[in-house]
């Protein structure tokens, strides 16, 4: 029998994996700041900061440079995942997505 706390923990873990994937995809179209991603996705900026740190450790996101953010009008870092193909790494090794890859994108090649 599962306790209420174990169910809450499992649901929050699923939510975090979902937010990580949404964050990764949100940086694909063009370089963006964390604030821009917060506005477009609704994910809190502190969470996006943690996800970007995790993605940088995995080599899945790159720092593009500094420029002025259109939302805050302050100097901010722009990041992008456009140059990083998500299928060029071992999906199961990173633990970013389940074995079959992200939902809706099919199976990984190779």
Image: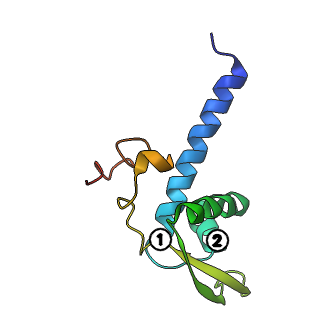
> Which residue is at 43% across, 41% downward?
98
Vertical side of 62 occupied by 66: above or below? below
Vertical side of 101 occupied by 73: above or below? below
In this rendered view, identify the residue nearer to me: 43 or 23: 23
Direction top: furthest residue: 1
Quadrant for the N terminus in the image? top right
Name which of mark 1 and mark 2 comes first in the sequence: 2
Q: Residues within 10 Å of mark 1 (few under 14, many from 20)?
A: many
Residue 35 point in image, percent of width and height? 66, 72
Residue 60 point in image, percent of width and height? 49, 65
> Which residue is at 53% across, 60% downward?
58
Q: Is residue 67 left or right of residue 29?
A: right
The quadrant holding residue 69 is bottom right
| Disc 1/disc 2 C-alpha distance (Å) | 13 Å
Q: Secondary structure at mark 1?
A: loop
Q: Is residue 60 left or right of residue 88?
A: right
In this rendered view, identify the residue nearer to me: 30 or 59: 59
Q: Which mark is residue 34?
A: 2
Q: Which residue is mark 1?
A: 81
The answer to whether residue 96 is visible is no
Vertical side of 73 occupied by 3: above or below? above
> Which residue is at 57% across, 52% downward?
19
In this rendered view, identify the residue nearer to me: 5 or 60: 60
The mark lying in front, picked from 1 and 2, is 1
Q: Secondary structure at mark 2?
A: helix
The answer to whether residue 95 is visible is yes
> Which residue is at 68% across, 59% downward?
50
Residue 99 point in image, percent of width and height? 38, 41
The quadrant holding residue 67 is bottom right
Q: Which mark is residue 39?
A: none
């Amino acid at each position: 029998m599962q306790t209420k706390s174990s169910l809450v923990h499992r649901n929050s873990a699923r939510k975090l994996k979902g937010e990580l994937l949404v964050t990764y995809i949100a940086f694909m179209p063009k370089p963006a700041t964390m604030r821009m991603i917060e506005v477009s996705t609704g994910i809190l900026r502190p969470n996006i900061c943690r996800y970007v740190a995790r993605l940088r450790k995995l080599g899945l996101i790159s720092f593009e440079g500094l420029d002025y953010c259109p939302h805050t009008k302050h100097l901010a870092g722009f990041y992008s995942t456009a140059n990083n193909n998500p299928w060029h790494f071992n999906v199961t090794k990173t633990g970013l997505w389940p074995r079959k890859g992200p939902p809706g994108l099919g199976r990984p090649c190779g």
